[in-house]
Image (cartoon, grey):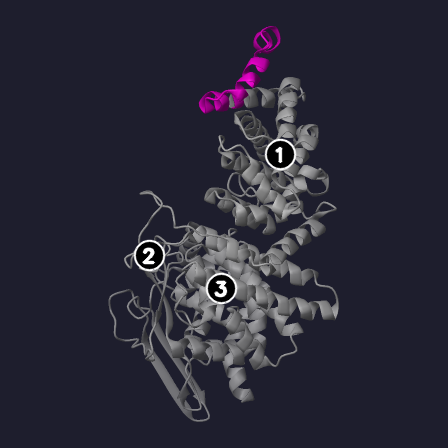
Amino acid sequence: MRVMFQDMDLMSQLVHQFQSEDQIISHLAAKSVSACVLYYLQTSGTISPVWRRTCLQAFHSSLPGTQLDACLWSLTELLKNLFKGAHQETFGKLLAALDSGLSSLCAKFLPDDSQEVTQCLVGFPSSRPWGTTFCLLLDLLEVLTASSLTWGPAACLRSQRITHTHSSALLATISGSSEYFVKKRAVLLLKRAVFQKAGEDWASGEVLLTELKHEHFRSDMSILARSVLTAVAADWLQAVQVESASFFGGTRAIRRDGGQKPDCVMLRSVSLLLLKSAELHIQTAGGAAGARSSGTEVYGYLQSLWSFLRRCSVQLTEVTHRCCWVSLLFGDQDDDMMEAAKASLSIFLHHRRCSGLDHSAVLEAACASGNNPHCIFLLLLQSISFDHSILLDFLISTETCFLEFLVRYLKYLTADWQGFTAACGKISGSDCHLSSQQSSPASCGGDVLTLTVKGEPRLVQYGSSSESDPEDMEVSQHEQGTSVYVTGTLSAVDVPQGPIRHKQCESSHLLLEADSALKGRPEGLSPPVLHSEQTGVNMTAVSGQVSCETSARAVLCLSQLREVVTRLQAKKLFPYTPSSLLKLLAQVENCPLSHFNKT
């Protein structure tokens, strides 16, 4: 090392190769230099002056080219390694040495004025593919954003806040850039920033978010949310183009009806960016007047989102029940689906508090905007075939926010059972079913959700199938001389199979297998369904009328979930204390009978 980097001055020679027009040579030089700079940083804490000077010059010149690309890639690689190794002090030292250069670079690529952004992109030399340089800059911004979320108060440099402070320019890039991969990469960065998930793809393990945020955190998140909503109000979504989905055979996947499959990654990212920004906006709305105004505004944004999704040919063009869009769009993307459901629930609860509308009008407005929480939850259950073991997967997974969503929704459900039963009737009456189909004409690629709408009511004959392992169900109720029994089996034939988690999570399997072993029950058998005498659940008829099948199956699913969680907790197999959740689940089981007694 001494001979090469002191006597032979190899660093200067390698850095000089950053300018090579041969991109392979330029990139190999960047890899070699990065390894050496990282070594000296970790052993002696010194930064190579030659490398630092070259990077600063490239950042200040801001012209796309192999040298700027090599410098961006090299810095990103160094910061990633230091970040993953938790070398916070060294990370800060390196970034501080280049902070001014990065600020200058972003002022050129991401100016404050959206018109300047377009002029900037058009003005770059056409001989160089600027999109590559821009994506390298976006990769660097994600590392900087991840560091600001992870290290809190220590993240005080301007460059660590660029994603938030220059969010308007990033949005202008998405609507104005001619390079689709640049648009998509920018949307993904903003989505991860607003959800505080920057670095999730490459960080070792999970990105641990500190509870102590840096002093500008709240204002930065507010800037990002406000930038998104301001852009949407100015018809930004109309300028966002969504191309056909990519696949291994090329980029033009043709559907059987002659159309092209839309890029669902782009659609989901734009949707989540808007939903989360709206949620942040209502959380920061000041005063009662501001809260009412924000509630009205947000529903306008949801209408714009609905128009955008329909324009992009998602399988929503013929859907009359807008609440289906969450399940239809997110398919088997469990983490994104739960984030969408949680943000939608927050928006709904805010509008319910501030709108001044009566209960029925609130729910009607929610369905018109596609965010009635009852409908969204029921369609989620329907898409997983009311399988409580999949809900268990969600509960013990650290990859989704399902626990937070479920607890908050159940609190609302126990206070609005009438709205829940109305939603059950609406879904059952329209027979809006979600099923998994391969190569569907309306699919977005792979196994995704397809909407089937039938005009005739659907009656399930529970005893009609023997093609799958049966789960015996016997429910009885004795109320004022009325005695109603429903006995039969549930099978794969009776219920459309949803795409979410067909293969169960390994952790859930381990818990259930351990529980089965302790209980002496053969593995693979579902726990017995509780009878109504044990749970107090009114599963079928009240006053001689059979209640909504969807409602009965939803309550049964939650009852089974409560039973298995209770059993796992008693045997100390559940990963956390679920006392509050179990209490809410028990309250939901009692809701049908309580509602009957009131009526």
Three-letter amino acid code at the position of disc 1? Ala
483 in relation to 489, above or below: below
Instruction: Give the percent coordinates (x, y) of residue 90.
Output: 67, 29
Residue bearing mark 3: 307
The magenta stretch spans residue 263? no
Q: Are marks 3 and 1 in contact (CB under 8 Å)?
A: no
- The residue positioned 63% from the left and 55% from the top of the image is 225
Task: State the residue in front, 533 or 67.
Answer: 67
Quadrant (top left, top right, bottom left, bottom right) of the N terminus: top right
The magenta stretch spans residue 27? yes
Task: State the residue in front, 152 or 392.
Answer: 152
- The residue positioned 63% from the left and 70% from the top of the image is 296
Residue bearing mark 2: 259
- Specify the quadrant of the image occupied by residue 68: top right
Instruction: Give the percent coordinates (x, y) of residue 318.
Output: 39, 69
Residue bearing mark 1: 86
Instruction: Give the percent coordinates (x, y) of residue 561.
Output: 46, 65
Q: Nearer the viewer, mark 3 or mark 1?
A: 3
- Which element type, helix, strand or loop, lies under badge 1? loop
Question: Which residues lie in the magenta part?
Answer: 1-30
Three-letter amino acid code at the position of disc 3? Ser
Could you tell me what secondary structure mostly forms the magenta stretch? helix
520 in relation to 251, above or below: below
Q: Earlier in the sequence, mark 2 or mark 1?
A: 1
Report, in whole angstroms, how far the alpha carbon at label 2 lies from the one at label 1: 48 Å
Q: Earlier in the sequence, mark 3 or mark 1?
A: 1
Task: State the residue in front, 255 or 548.
Answer: 255
Report, in whole angstroms, how far the alpha carbon at label 2 lies from the one at label 3: 19 Å
Q: Is residue 197 visible?
A: no
Task: State the residue in front, 62 or 391.
Answer: 62
- Which element type, helix, strand or loop, lies under badge 3? helix
